[in-house]
Amino acid sequence: MSDRLRAVLSEPEAGRFGPEADLIRATVRSFVATEILPHVDRWEEAGTFPRELYPRAGDVGILGVGYPEDVGGTPTGLWGQIATWEEMARCTSGGIAASLGSHHIALPPIVAHGTPEQQARFVSPVLAGDRIAALAITEPGAGSDVANLMTRAVRDGDHYLIDGSKTFITSGVRADQITVAVRTGGPGHDGISLLVVEADVDGFTRSGPMAKMGWWPSDTATLYFDRVRVPVANRVGPENAGFRIIMENFQMERLQLAVSGYVTAETAIVEAWRYATDRTVFGRPVAGFQANRHRFVDLVAETTAAKEFTYRAAEGIERGEDRTTEISLAKLLATAAAEHATYAAVQLFGGAGYLRGNVAERLYRDARILAIGGGTSEIMREIVAKRIL
Amino acid sequence: MKIAVCAKQIPDPATPYELDPEHHWIVRPDDQILDDTDRYGVEIGLQLAEASEGSVTLFSMSPAGNLQGIRQALAMGADKAVIVSDPALKGSDALVTAKVLARAIQQEGFDLVIAGTESTDGSAGVLPQQLSELLEVPALTFAKAVEHDGDTIRIHRQTPDGYDEVEATLPAVLTVTAGVVEPRYPTFKGIMQAKQKPVEQLTAADLGFDATEVGAAGSAQYVRSVTPVPARQAGEIVEDDGEAYRKILEVLEQAKVV
């Protein structure tokens, strides 16, 4: 029974993704099955995972999915990317998936607006897994309010001098390079630029990994900039044009978070129902009670609808259309589905679901960040309200 | 070295197989995957080709469908594929299949033919030996390790007690077991490149067969009837009265585990 449920939730309709994306899915599935799943419990408890996983993922092509060939990527189209993100999210550890994917928010501005020299230095080695890349926007004093960020970069000849700090930075502890949003001009969104800071420069320090509710193996850090000298050649795009680039970049990040949302929901539903078919109470399986059956069908409906809506946004993006409204709605729907499904999964597991090491317990904790990171649900509602009301 | 690898497209074993009620042939959907046992043949073929600056050509006889199974092997790194796909071949037994593949392989030329030990869907396990007979070259079978040195190929042939060392001069036929190598994942690059690789599709007539020589008409073997697998019997439960270990030892000895 749980096989049928798994097929309904996790196997794409034949022909939906296309033959290449289907093969990519199979490859990522094998990679996750052999390189991650056997170690995932241990890495979760350790709060980290070996750095060697990056070049392994790089060799297969996972890190370079969707990037142009001349920077070392594989241009698979969006469906190849979605297939990759879906299967990576099925590793059951949001922290590992997020760490291995942190370059997906750090690199696209360099790919879209960087010079060939910047791309050779900052994109290719990251896609190969030899360097780790992070994006730093959030500050202790400004999160969702990007236009009011305070970290300052003052021009000094061929360099900028950066002062300020960034926080909640995914891959912040291990990153070799950080794409940093800084204020180079006046107040508001017209004064923001993006600079690539290499982690070995003087004046740059960072906290150890921040202890978090979920995403344990992910190295989240606070970054400090004390007169950090960065060449002007490291600026991505024109001066003071950073805000627009950041907003563009958010679209793909939110699409990925929507994918993480519905996959988290699917995994929670399948794992909980597998347990429910085995576990007997009052002389029958937990799965035999109508209250549980109906509740789980509701969850399947909610999750599938969120997934299909995300696919609809993706189809528009593939045609080159602006899908900001749909992407925001997809993130809102899919991350809510993740919360509902993981809550129900823990409930169905009962006491076992409250124990550390139980997959439902982990998914429940990991799901919570999805409605916060990459723009909160409140921001998603605000974006949609501005566009349609 | 010119390497021919036999690669079969089969319906996904994770899905229930459908047999047509009249002939008991497997109903083959458009969407077939590469037989898992063939991934080992493809991998060893690629390794031998890489070491000898050779090439790997895949050979398959099956309805082409959407070619997804063949693409999987091309994505691993094979150079091209020759697939014999023809409604006239429906119902071919192992020997007819071997004749068709032998002619396709001969037409292309080869130093080494590699196959799995048996397919997952048919499980006859005789085709590679028939191929070696038809191609008039030696057969090295059940290899769990392979070594290649100039014109010589040397293998560890899996036996119930261990292995035999067997060697032959090329050209030859080689069958490999699942333990021989760890097959690589198709990389994303390999998957995208596979789209551009040549896949030659042939009919039985292209290989000089007429309709009476192939398919059900040309086959001596047919399936008389099909019986469902009997349900698994419950295991034996040994109550432990302090002496259960004796019984367990006895069972292990019978199974030749100890």
Image: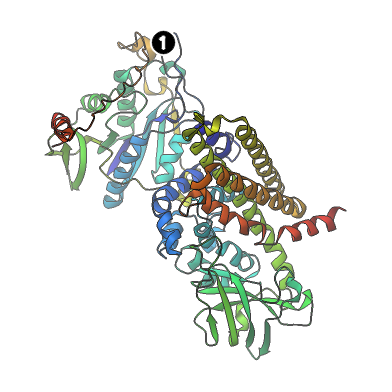
* Front-lying residue, B97 or A322: A322
* Front-lying residue, A296 or A186: A296
Tell me if residue A314 can be seen: yes
Residue A53 in picture, x, y percent from top left: 42, 60
Residue A183 in picture, x, y percent from top left: 71, 80
The colour scheme of the drawn protein is rainbow
Drawn side of residue A84 relative to residue B99, left or right? right
Tell me if residue B196 can be seen: no
Residue A271 in picture, x, y percent from top left: 51, 42
Q: Quadrant of residue A18?
A: top right
Question: How busy is the neighbourhood of tag 1: few (under 14 within 10 Å), some, or many (20 plus)?
Answer: some
Residue at image point 37% right, 9% down: B217
User: Which chain's residue wears label 1?
Assistant: B
Drawn side of residue B158 relative to residue A388, left or right? left
Q: Residue furthest right?
A: A389
Above or below, A76 relative to B97? below
Residue at image point 19% right, 46% down: B147
* Front-lying residue, A387 or B82: A387
**At numbered mark 1, what does the secondary structure look like: helix, strand or loop?**
loop
Which residue type carries mark 1? His
Above or below, A22 relative to B100? below
Residue at image point 67% right, 37% down: A298
Above or below, B29 relative to B252? above
Q: Which residue is mark 1?
A: B23
Residue B230 in picture, x, y percent from top left: 34, 17
Q: Quadrant of residue B17?
A: top left
* Front-lying residue, A8 or B237: B237
Drawn side of residue B236 relative to residue B205, left or right? left
Q: Residue furthest bottom?
A: A157
